[in-house]
Amino acid sequence: MHSHAFNWPERALISFACLLAICVLLTACDEHPQTYGTKVIIQTVDRPVPLPCPVKKPVRPAKLDKPLPTDLRALVKVLEAKLLEYAGPGKYADQANDDLETCIHPPAPAK
């Protein structure tokens, strides 16, 4: 055994003494209240909460059928019909625009 090594009862006693000193120091911290104070103020504030948008996503027009016509006139007719499905009056683009307007500027709640 080395001459500088402690036996286990001495180690236990030293560990216990250190633990006791730490506990006494921590307990002493509790006895002195802080000289500065913190004031807690509870304040109720009414804030409007945004509601979910009340619209449903419009149905997107179907994709173009493949293969596309090779005849130029037939291709123009197919593309024109598809464009009207998107941008025609009351179609997908108008429905999506109306839905966005409803969500951005919702109607006033009924009283």
Image: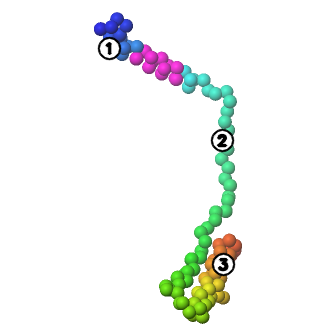
The stretch in magenta equals 15-27
The Cα atoms of the two marked residues, 3 and 2, are separated by: 48 Å
Is 1 above or below relative to 103? Answer: above
The Cα atoms of the two marked residues, 1 and 2, are separated by: 51 Å
Q: Tell me if I can see residue 97 in this picture.
A: yes
Q: Earlier in the sequence, mark 3 or mark 1?
A: 1
What residue is pinned by disc 3?
97
Q: Amino acid at mark 2?
A: Val
x 65%, y 47%: residue: 42
At numbered mark 2, what does the secondary structure look like: helix, strand or loop? Answer: loop
What residue is pinned by disc 1?
8
Position of the N terminus by quadrant: top left
Asked if residue 19 lies in the magenta stretch, the reply is yes
Task: Using the image as rendered, state which of residue 69 and residue 87 is in the foreground.
Answer: 69
Cβ–Cβ under 8 Å for marks 1 and 2? no
What residue is pinned by disc 2?
40
x 56%, y 25%: residue: 30
At numbered mark 1, what does the secondary structure look like: helix, strand or loop? Answer: helix
The Cα atoms of the two marked residues, 3 and 1, are separated by: 82 Å
Determine which quarter of the picture holds residue 31.
top right
